[in-house]
Image (spheres, grey):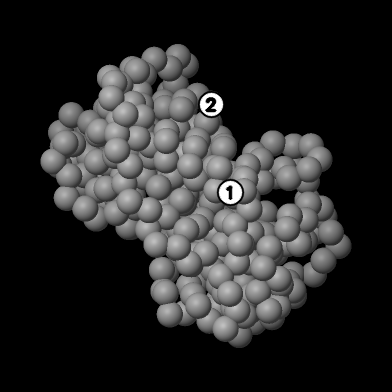
Amino acid sequence: MLRASADANNETVEMRGVGHVTVDSGVPGDGELTALTDAVVLRDPDELVIARSRAIERLGAASTVRAIAVAANFEMMNRLLDAAGVGPTAAMRPVGGLIDVTLPARFG
Amino acid sequence: MVAVPAVPAEIDELIGRRWDAVRSPGSSFSGAERVAIAGSARGETATTVSAGVTDAARRIHDAPATITLEWLDTLRSDGLTDSAFVEVIGLVAQVRALDTFEFGVGRAQRPLPAPVDGEPTGADVAGAALDGGWIPTVGPASPMSVLSLAPAEHEAMVDISEVFYLAPRGGDGFTMGNQHVVRDGLTRSQIEFVASRTSLINDCFF
């Protein structure tokens, strides 16, 4: 979906930036969004205070709350799909290479 | 230090609405059992549901990427029906989403609610079959069909998606079909960046 949205908006996104914090994805505020998402999903209360403050300073309070809500939504979606054995479609699999992440063996 | 941000009313209304559903009878479980499943997911000890259901709730909550078909088959051989398993999946995934959001905005974890009395409504879904996933779905297994066997949990998933992320449909406004959407100042690419990063952390590769 990230690649599709970037294409639709004529944006250049370096997909490896999703998985590698040292790579600039080209998405505005990606560093702040990465730190915020990591702190929220990994339930790190100390990092969360810092990451949320930095996100608010860079993106604003409303966008920061929205980013937290999006992360929460995908906490749900990831569990639905993994628990039901719904893996990536053949069309999705090349995205693993774009992000520079090796798909687990369970996906063949 | 920047203050904890305010939460929009639509999100607080969603959270209240969904916890009300969690504590109410579902298709395979009573309200008391559903609250116990929510507690099991959080790591609490439950006595009102079976060990298999407790195990399922905890694993879906804590380590979903480690779930295998063999493990699911073990639950089946212990008597857990696919409809009941799907209700557990939906319930636990919702609780995880609601708890994650409240953690993210700096709130304490919400106490489990008191259950609503009443019996399970029963599950009667026509046309479900194995079609790409481990559990029967109406149509090919996908995010929109994965909870086919528990329609109320599917509706809950759609409700949460609409308020937290984007509505799972096409059209203008806050929908998944709108690639140009901006919500609360967050562009679609920023929204999808957070979605991708979350999935990567969770080892979910859909």
The kind of secondary structure element at disc 2 is loop
- What residue is drawn where x is 49% and y is 32%? B154
- What residue is drawn where x is 42% and y is 33%? B21
The kind of secondary structure element at disc 1 is helix
- Mark on residue A52? none
The residue wearing badge 2 is B139
Left or right, B204 with reference to B47: right
Three-letter amino acid code at the position of disc 2: Gly
Left or right, A39 with reference to B31: right
Residue A87, image x, y percentages: 48, 48
The quadrant in which residue B143 appears is top right
Q: Nearer the viewer, residue A35 or B7?
A: B7
The quadrant in which residue B169 appears is top right
| Neighbour tally class for label 2: few under 14, some 14-19, many 20 plus, Cα within 10 Å | some
| Residues at marks 2 and 1, CA–CA distance in whole angstroms | 31 Å
Chain for disc number 2: B
| Neighbour tally class for label 1: few under 14, some 14-19, many 20 plus, Cα within 10 Å | some
Name the quadrant of the N terminus of chain B: bottom right
Residue B58, image x, y percentages: 27, 51
- Mark on residue B11? 1
